[in-house]
Each structure stands twice: as C-alpha cells, then as structure tokens.
Image (spheres, grey):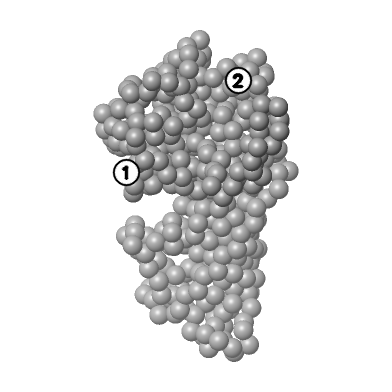
Amino acid sequence: MTGEPSVAVVIVAAGSGTRLGGGIPKGFVALGGVPLVERAVHAARSMGEPVQVVSVVPATLQTRAEELLGSRATVVAGGESRQQSVAAGLAALVGSVRTVLVHDAARALAPASLFDAVVDAVRRTGGGVVPGLPVADTIKRLGPDGAVLATIDRSELSAVQTPQGFPRASLEKAYGRAEQEYTDDAAVFAAAGQPVIVVPGHPLAFKITTPADLARAEQLLAPGAPPRTGIGIDVHAFGGDGELRLATLAWPGEPPLAGHSDGDAVAHAICDALLSAAGLGDIGERFGTADPRYAGAEGAVFLRETLALLRANGFEPGNVSVQIVAARPRFSARRREAEAALSALIGAPVSVTATTSDGLGFTGRGEGVAAIATALVRPAARLP
C-alpha cells in the first residue's frame, strides 16, 4: 500500500461457518485452493486506489491469518457477534481513512470493481451505500401455520450484498449508539437515522454459506467454467500526428490515425471486447480522453491496463478475434506478425483478419479504419 489511504475495507471472517461444514471457520475454508478470506483480501487490494485492509478473524486463528495474509492486511481478533467484530475492525483504522467498506469474507468472489463502485457512491451521496440485486422469485408472507397471508411486491425488494460503504465518522457514531444486534451494517447505520441507498450489485458477490454455495463457486472457477463473450468496435479517421500504429505495430509510410491516443483501432476494439465480456464497462469509461495519462499512449498501454482490470476482477482472457475494415494499409503481409504480437501481449490466442468495404462508406473512401473484435474471458482459477 502506497500513500495515506482515504479508504479502508474491513473484512469480517470471524464466523464459525457451521452451515458450511469443513470443521474450520468459514473464512479459512479453501476455494480453488485459496482460503475465502485471502480471496476477499485480494479483491480489496485490487481496488483502483490505495486502501487499508483490516481482516477480522477468530482469536484462535489470528496468528495463522497473520502468516497467511502478511503485509496485505492488518489482522485483528473478532468478538462474539458480527457487530463486535466490525467494531474491532473499525478500531484498527488509520487516521487518514474517511470512507469505510465492510465486507463479508464469505462473498469471496465479489470483484474489485464492485468495491470501487460503492466507494464512488459513498463519496457522491455522503450516506450509506449497499449493493443489491433485484429479487427474481415471488415472495410470500406466511402465517405461523404456513398459510399464505400476502404476496409481496418484489419491485420494492432488493437482495443486498457486501461490501457496504459508509462515511467513517458516521459509521463509528452509529456503532457507538447501537443498542441491539442487526443483520448487517446498513441496518446499524439506518437505525442511527442515517440515509442508505442501494446501488447495482454483482452476480459474483453471492454469499458462500452452504456446501452447495461452495460447489457453485468451485464450478465458476473451474477450467471448464462457461466463458463470457464481449464485442468491441472502434473507428479512427486518418489525420493524426506521427506514424500509423495498428495492431500495436508501426506502419512506416502510412498516414497516422487521429485520436487522443495513438488511434490504434485494433487495440482499442480488443479492449472494449475484453471489458464488455467481463462486465467492466468500456474503454471510454475506463481510459477517457479527460485523463492526461493516456494522451498519445500506444495501444499496448491500453491492453495492459485492461488485462490488469480483468485480473483484478477475477477474469482471464480466453481468446480474441479481430476483423479490420479498411482500404489501407495492406494488412495481409503482416497478419502473422500482428497476431503474434497481440497474442504475446494478451497471453491468449488472437486472430486478425482484414477486409475492404468495396469502396463503400468512409473506409471505402480511405478516410479511416474500423475494427470489430470479439473476446472470450473466463473466471481465473487462481489468484495472480
């Protein structure tokens, strides 16, 4: 961790996990060979800014957790209840922290992008923020004898997840006033009269509570897990400065493409396809023209940043296919070279083909280049 962090993540891993079985506390049960608490810490450490990570574990396993997590997290002993454990985590925060996320180690597959989104919402609203998913099932209210009393309007319901985010000072005051046990931190916060909103959650942030949940998580991490697919399209006009960069290669003698960066339509389309497949937005959202770091940047820079985002969110590329539509440059003579360069950079097979548009449109008139990419990504079985 570099710099003085303004964000902290308190990861609660002090529960017994009796419903999960395994004979050890839930946070230390292995998923894909990695304990749940370690996976949760990795996600927090993969956020887009420096963070302090505090892991709250059973007192009997504090030494083991310190050996497991090393410098990646501050380890403290939890209490008899979840609220006592969170309070112990809050007491370990450094002075620079202004925003606190509280996260369950049992939601070990929650991606770093969800943590970042919650932090952004806390800063934007100044209140509590909870990620949640719409309730898909019809919900019935029952009487003590099992009789149906009413059908609940599920449009008013949300299945909430963690990490839940709060302004530090307000959360500490809420915990100081809590007079009963609540099921989550948002309830503690709301009981103190503080506002809480729900933002979109993530399907991977499900809670691993039972053996069936663990089996589902293992299946998602398995090499044979279903891949996810994404599509990316990028277009750039000729007219930039310097030399043409396309598919990360230099093309001497060809007119350059215009853009905030080097205009490499192939690299940019691949980034969009990978981000789309992983559910991480698009290149404009992640590396927008307002960011001076990417002014004039080569396509390889965007690809490396995109791959880092994928890894941080538990994905790895499977393969990529790109179709270039352009009257120039003549691509066929360098196709193998481009495929080799892109495959080495991405760490997965990349195929590139090129075609013209028979004189139609801006590409047919030689005004620019279009690239269409498709990508497959899959959950990464191991932490990087």
**Residue 266 image-quadrant placement:** bottom right
- The single residue placed furthest to the right in the displayed view is 224
Residue 87: quadrant of the picture: top left
Tell me the crowding category of disc 2: few under 14, some 14 to 19, or many 20 or more residues within 10 angstroms, Cα based.
Answer: many
**Residue at position x 39%, y 61% in the image:** 288
Residue 253 position in % (x across, y down): 46, 79
Q: Amino acid at mark 2?
A: Gly
| Residue at the spot of label 2 | 17
User: Most extreme residue toward the top, as rendered?
Assistant: 60
Establish if 70 lies above or below 126. above
Pair 2/1: label in front: 1
Looking at marks 2 and 1 on the same chain, the residue that comes earlier in the sequence is marked by 2
Q: CA distance from mark 2 to mark 1?
A: 34 Å
- Helix, strand or loop at label 2? It is loop
Quarter of the image with the C terminus in it: top right
Kindly identify the amino acid type of the residue bearing the numbered disc 1: Gly
Find residue 126 and name its label: 1
Q: Which quadrant would the N terminus be assigned to in this image?
A: top left
Residue 303, position in %: x, y? 50, 56
> Element type at marker 1?
loop
Image location (x, y in percent) of residue 301? 44, 56
Q: Decide which of 336, 279 is in the foreground and name it.
A: 279
Q: Report whether residue 5 is seen.
A: no
